[in-house]
Image (tube, rainbow, N blue to C red):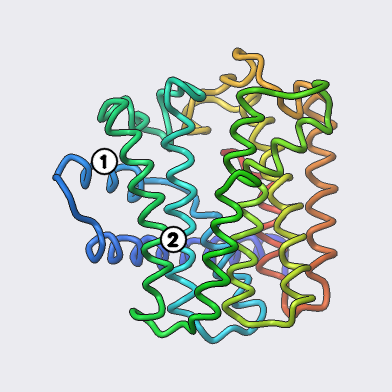
Amino acid sequence: MSARTQHVDFEKKFDATRTRVNQRLSELLDLYLGGPPRIQDAVRYVLLDGGKRLRPILCVWTHDLLDGTNDDACLDVAVAIECLHTYTLVHDDLPCMDDDDLRRGKPSCHKQFGEAIAVLTGDAVQSLCFEIVSDIERRIGLTPRHAAAVTRIIARAAGTRGLIAGQTLDLYPEGKRDLSAVSRVHRAKTAELIAAAMESGAVIADPVDDVRGRVRLAGLSAGEAFQIIDDVLDVEAEVDTLGKTPRKDLSSGKLTYPSVAGADASRARAAELVSRAKTQLEGLGDTSALEAILDFLIVRKR
């Protein structure tokens, strides 16, 4: 198979899975979303239009790699993880955080609806994540053991050892401004949730613990690579491609990988991390799809 054919097949598979995620997300919003029309409009605004759906796709493809049979449950967990990720974006864009006016090529939630509704929207979308997961046993039939394990994985990634820690360190760096400090932020703020997406897919497939651990390590490496390239694109990309304000990190003096090591060394480090992730997945089955998405992490333009 030629490189061109592999690329086309990856794009088709990626787009097909993204379509499934988007369709199920819309269905679950119809099922669970309530409250005043303004908050419903804001939730749909941040969730339904745009986004690569990288984390849910990693969840689904990891489940498939391990020959999982709980496709419907995995898809719902994948959607829940996208909800959690979107909550972080809504809050990250707020003036008290990164203060960004653009997200996914359109006005950020707080620019469209105001800061108060943006805070509530982020809260609502995070709550929606856990409502979807906690109700999977009743809705689809995932065993309580698996549902509880997934809940723990996602909650850990979202909490003070994961996303909250990463955002805090991003706002208030500690110690030297070196690569070790950057990696601590990247791991907590980005890599933990990407690892949680892959580990959740593995848990639903119900492999042995060793496999689950290897998948988590692969996710951590992939997540760090993703964030490094995100930092590089902040410097190199333009707004029409990036979908958010470019050079925002640079202008604010934020601690990033290219600000410490430069763009070339950053890309080399990302490639090294992707190679490490692939090594963790060796021997688990047909890893071609996941390897393709890992390669995509370091060649993407947005």
Residue 149 is left or right of residue 25, and the answer is: right
Q: Which residue is the extreme one toward the left? A: 37
**How far across and down, in percent of the image, does residue 168 sit?**
61, 31
Q: Is residue 234 above or below residue 134?
A: above
> Mark 1 highlights which residue?
42
Work out how far the residue at label 1 is from the one at label 2, CA to CA, in angstroms.
17 Å
Sequence-wise, which precedes: disc 1 or disc 2? 1
Secondary element at image label 2: helix
Residue shown at the point (14%, 45%) measured from the top left: 36
Q: Quadrant of the N terminus?
A: bottom right
Amino acid marked by disc 2: Ala
Examine the image and state in which quarter residue 58 appears: bottom right
At label 1, counting other C-alpha atoms closer than 10 Å, the crowd grade (few under 14, some 14-19, many 20 or more) is many
Location of residue 225 by image quarter? top right
Would you name the residue on which mark 2 appears? 80
Q: Say which amino acid is labelled 1.
A: Ala
Q: Which residue is drawn at the image coordinates 52% and 33% (left, top)?
A: 242
Residue 197, given in percent of the width and then of the height, sits at 59, 61
> Position of 141 compared to 10: left or right?
left
Q: Quadrant of the C terminus?
A: top right
Q: How many marks?
A: 2
Position in image of residue 10 (x %, y %): 60, 64
Q: Residue at x 64, y 66 (%)?
A: 199
Secondary element under disc 1, as helix, strand or loop, is helix
- Left or right, 117 with reference to 168: left
Of residues 262 and 156, the one drawn nearer to the viewer in this rendering:
156
Q: Is residue 196 left or right of residue 240?
A: right
Q: Residue at x 65, y 22 (%)?
A: 172
